[in-house]
Image (spheres, rainbow, N blue to C red):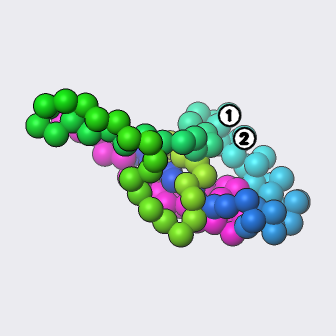
Amino acid sequence: MAKFVTIGYGDQDGYDRTDAAVRNQAHAHDARLVEGGAVAGIAGSPVRVRNHDAAGVSVENGPFMSSALPVAGFGIIEAATIEEAVELVSKTPCAVAQGVVEVWPLRESS
């Protein structure tokens, strides 16, 4: 099975506008993914780390990425194909609650 990194984007307003029954089904779907071995979590406040030319570490608060919606969470899932990974994340809270989920194939480094 291949591994995929998922990045969920969404905001509280979109979440609140989504029918509670739909949100509850999405959270139950997330729980089943986690029970099946997926790793998932809500995004906290990030820091940016630099160590250019290995000359010294600098750390700054805040995200490096920017998007119209804030990052809401991350996951690592396993699926046979990217199409299967898309199907799995299409039922998660960010996907159904007015947000979006990116699916990134995670390739093993050599």
Question: Which residue is more in the foreground, 22 or 82?
Answer: 22
Residue 101 colored magenta? yes
Q: Which mark is residue 15?
A: none
Q: Disc 2 residue type?
A: Ala
The residue where tag 1 is placed is: 35
The residue where tag 2 is placed is: 31
Determine the secondary structure under disc 2: helix
Q: Disc 1 residue type?
A: Glu
Residue 86 in sight in this render? yes
**Image quadrant in which you'd find residue 108:** top left
Q: Residue at x 69, y 69 (%)?
A: 98
Magenta segment: 82-110
- The residues bearing labels 2 and 1 have C-alpha atoms spaced at a distance of 6 Å
In the rendered image, residue 73, in percent from the top left (x then y), is placed at 58, 48
Determine the secondary structure under disc 1: helix
In the rendered image, residue 9, in percent from the top left (x then y), is placed at 58, 59
In the rendered image, residue 92, in percent from the top left (x then y), is placed at 67, 55
Q: Residue at x 38, y 41 (%)?
A: 60
**Image quadrant in which you'd find residue 47:** top left
- How many marks overall? 2
Question: Which residue is more in the foreground, 89 or 17?
Answer: 17
User: Can you say which quadrant of the picture contains the N terminus?
Assistant: top left
Q: Residues within 10 Å of mark 2 (few under 14, many from 20)?
A: some
**Image quadrant in which you'd find residue 70:** bottom right
Q: Residues within 10 Å of mark 1 (few under 14, many from 20)?
A: few
Q: Residue at x 26, y 39 (%)?
A: 50
Labels 2 & 1 near each other (Cβ < 8 A): yes
In the rendered image, residue 48, in percent from the top left (x then y), is placed at 37, 42
User: Can you say which quadrant of the picture contains the C terminus?
Assistant: top left
Is 58 on the left or on the right of 75, as rendered?
left
Residue 91 in sight in this render? no
